[in-house]
Image (cartoon, rainbow, N blue to C red):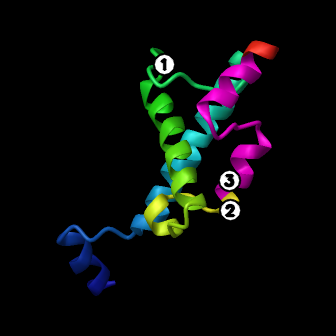
Amino acid sequence: EERINKLESIGFNWVSEYTSKQHKWDEMFEELKQFKAKHGHVDVPRRYAENQKLGNWVMNQRQAYRKYKAGFVQSNSGICEERIDRLESIGFIWTRNQATSSIQET
């Protein structure tokens, strides 16, 4: 208990950076699911006025995917097979052109 108090007194963070990043990714994924429920697709515009953070996040997922497919490891690209599967399970399209054309078809 004393060691815990000493560590906390100097600002020790008990949550790992990985856990924190995973939590943030999960939050953005939930926001993307909410966007889909409202709009019927997951092609968030980069400059989405209601939630610019979500538009940037979607763009970052596409960039991370391209890096991942080019051979960069997860720690560098920020994406892994689990995240790819989760995104694809809600209809995520990895290239902007494919996303735009699928929206126009509906």
- Amino acid identity at mark 1: Tyr
Q: Which mark is residue 48?
A: 1
Considering the numbered disc 2 on the image, is that residue within a helix, a strand or a loop?
A: helix
Residue 1 lies in quadrant = bottom left
Residue depicted at 50% across the width and 37% down the height: 59
Pointer 1 or 2: first along the chain = 1
Q: Which residue is mark 2?
A: 81
Q: Position of residue 28 (x, y in %)?
A: 54, 40
Please tell me whether residue 96 is drawn above or below residue 63 in the rendered image. Answer: above
Which one is in front, 36 or 67?
67
In the foreground, 64 or 14: 64
Place residue 4 in its image quadrant: bottom left
Helix or strand or loop: what does disc 3 sit on?
A: helix
Q: Which residue is mark 3?
A: 84
Please state the extent of the stretch shown in magenta in the rendering: 83-103
Residue sitting nearer the eye, 4 or 55: 55
User: Which residue is situated farthest in the right direction here?
Assistant: 106
Residue 35 shows in the view: yes
Instruction: List the single residue furthest toward the left.
Output: 10
Q: Are marks 3 and 1 in contact (CB under 8 Å)?
A: no
Q: Secondary structure at mark 1?
A: loop
Left or right, 86 with reference to 18: right
Q: Assign the magenta stretch its main secondary structure.
A: helix
Callout 2–callout 3 Cβ contact below 8 Å: yes
Residue 97 screen position, x and y as percent: 63, 28
